[in-house]
Image (spheres, rainbow, N blue to C red):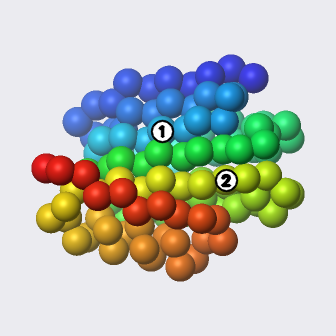
Amino acid sequence: MERIEIEGTAKTPTVKMDPSGVIELKGRSIPENSIEFYKPLMDWLEEYENNPQPKTVVHVQLEYFNTSSSKCILDLFKKLESIKQKGNDVIIKWYYEEDDEDMLEAGEDYQSIINVPFEMIETEV
């Protein structure tokens, strides 16, 4: 399996997806076409699901994402949930700035939908 590394831009997040079981999403997610941007990430997770690590750690440190990105992120989380249901450890570490209640709430919303452990991590501005 190949590692994915996508350099972030003003509209897209930095992405690192490593077959060792570490996944990172960081920055802003407001791409012109969210489905097109997130498709390679979904494809990678589908392949990873066939032979996942015993433990997968997902670091999500987004400062902002739009509605279409939120749906794509949910789809990624559902794929992670599927990996967990097959008996693998999966944890999502959701980072938010201490004064960013919207991002905390977004993480809590995902946590209520997805059956994967979340760790809410407050960061300093």
- Say which quarter of the image contains residue 70: bottom left
**Badge number at residue 104:** none
User: What residue is shown with label 1?
Assistant: 24
- Tell me which amino acid carries mark 2: Val
Q: Which percent across, then down, holds residue 111?
A: 52, 72
Q: Amino acid at mark 1?
A: Glu
Question: Front-most of 34 and 98?
Answer: 98
Q: Residue at x 36, y 47 (%)?
A: 61
Residue at x 37% of width, y 70% of height: 106
Residue visible at 36% across and 57% down? Answer: 121
The vertical placement of 110 against 125, above or below, is: below
Which residue is at 73% across, 53% downward? 89
- The residue sitting at the bottom extreme is 112
Is any atom of residue 32 visible in this view? no
Residue 29 in the image: above or below residue 66? above
Provide the residue designation for mark 2.
Answer: 90
Q: Is residue 46 above or below residue 80?
A: above
Q: CA distance from mark 1 to mark 2?
A: 13 Å
Viewer-closest of 124 and 12? 124
- Comparing labels 1 and 2, the label whose residue is closer to the camera: 2
Vertical placement of 34 versus 115: above or below?
Answer: above
Q: Secondary structure at mark 2?
A: strand
- Residue placed farthest to the top in the image? 2
